[in-house]
Amino acid sequence: MFAQKKGQIITDFGKTFEVINPDFKTDLKNELKVVFDVGRSFKDTTKVNPLINTAARYLNMHVDAGVPKDKLSVAIVIHGAAANDILRNEKYRSRFGIENPNAKLITDLHNNGVQIILCGQTAAYRGIERSDVLPEIQLALSAMTALVQLQNENYRLINF
């Protein structure tokens, strides 16, 4: 049976399952560059956005599988409803009445080299100022711009 386990990189988030002797072998030599396109949030504002948590799972599972951490490059492009998930605690509290459950995850991801990029068009449309978002967040002209530029840098797109 498969048992869920904590990762080595982001220990509070991104639990994974060990897969013993997979037929499709994980490449341990080449760089794995990925950009997660995250435009959705979920109704339960008390829980971490599972799409953002996937970036932690990505790091944890690949390091656990033997990929050197320096071979992993990860970015998250945030837009749409997911913009609420990167708000500072004060702003999140004013909207939802609680601290942002994603704040520690965002900090942990950032501290492990993950770029977290907010669509400037989403921010403007939703009235989100730069001072409203967590300090780890980068602001881009648009999600489309960030996604194209990252793909031009050989990041592979994962879209949910």
Image (spheres, helix red, strand yellow):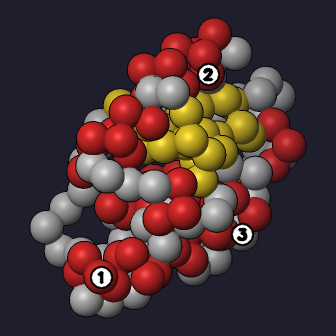
**124 displayed left or right of 15:** left
Residue under the image location 75 percent in, 58 percent down = 112
Image position, residue 98 (x, y; %): 31, 89
Q: Nearer the viewer, mark 1 or mark 3?
A: 1
Q: Nearer the viewer, mark 2 or mark 3?
A: 2
Instruction: Look at the numbered disc 3 and give the secondary structure of its residue.
Output: loop
Q: Could you tell me the amino acid type at mark 1?
A: Ser
Q: Could you tell me the amino acid type at mark 2?
A: Leu
Compared to 89, does 111 lie above or below? above
Q: Could you tell me the amino acid type at mark 3?
A: Gln
Image position, residue 92 (x, y; %): 35, 76
Observer-nearest of 103 and 158:
103
Residue denoted by label 2: 150
Instruction: Look at the numbered disc 1 and give the secondary structure of its residue.
Output: helix
**134 displayed left or right of 32:** left
Compared to 149, does 54 lie above or below? below
Q: Nearer the viewer, mark 2 or mark 1?
A: 1
Q: Residues within 10 Å of mark 2 (few under 14, many from 20)?
A: some
Give the image quarter of residue 38. Answer: top left
Residue denoted by label 3: 8
Compared to 127, does 76 lie above or below? above
Q: Residues within 10 Å of mark 3 (few under 14, many from 20)?
A: some
